[in-house]
Amino acid sequence: MGSFKLGKMTLGSLFKKPETLLYPFETKPAPAGLKGHIENDMKVCILCGICQKACPAHSITVDKKAGTWTIDHFGCVQCSSCVRACPKSCLTMLPTYQKPTRAMAPEVFTKPEESEEEKAAKEAAKKAKLEAAMKAKAEREAAKE
Ligand code: SF4
Ligand code: SF4
């Protein structure tokens, strides 16, 4: 009786879709809220280092001089403290796992070079801010007299 059941199961499985996936070529859709891995939008990151201080696993290294933000995905415990601490909201906990790799090396993100337009816009914003602050100061002093 047992071998009949086993034979039936074996035959049945020949015509069924396999239960397993051919990972990494096929992946399951990630469930909502899955803590996969951290990504940094380096265009927004200001390399302030707050995430490095907030990380309980010491998995983040910020090098402002070199313009790099490095994460050791193998040390990361997916707690999201860095995401919550970041003042620029440029860190995201993506619901996907890292690609398989042979080397346990940290991932290095590099700050992209600013274009001339971006530099000019930044300078203009800085100038406008300074002018507004000076104007406000002058108005305050005028009101005192
Ligand atoms: S806290 Fe945010 S802005 Fe600051 S270094 Fe980390 S990722 Fe960049
Ligand atoms: S998720 Fe937690 S452990 Fe991972 S890098 Fe961010 S703060 Fe560190």
Image: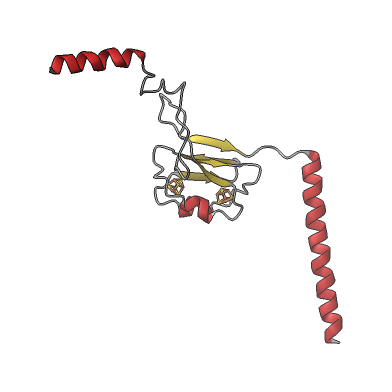
Nearer to me, 35 or 136: 35
In the image, residue 22 sits, relative to residue 144, either above or below, namely above
- Residue placed at 85% from the left, 77% from the top? 139
- Residue placed at 42% from the left, 45% from the top? 78
Quadrant in which residue 76 is drawn: top left
Image position, residue 20 (x, y; %): 36, 23
In the image, residue 32 sits, relative to residue 88, either above or below, namely above
- Residue placed at 62% from the left, 47% from the top? 45
Quadrant in which residue 128 is drawn: bottom right
Residue furthest to the bottom: 145
For the C terminus, the quadrant is bottom right
Q: How is the image coloured?
A: secondary structure
In the image, residue 19 sits, relative to residue 143, either above or below, namely above
Compared across the picture, whether 10 is left or right of 128 comes to: left
Residue furthest to the left: 1
Quadrant in which residue 6 is drawn: top left
Nearer to me, 66 or 44: 44
For the N terminus, the quadrant is top left
Image position, residue 127 (x, y; %): 82, 57
Image position, residue 119 (x, y; %): 78, 45
Image position, residue 74 (x, y; %): 39, 37
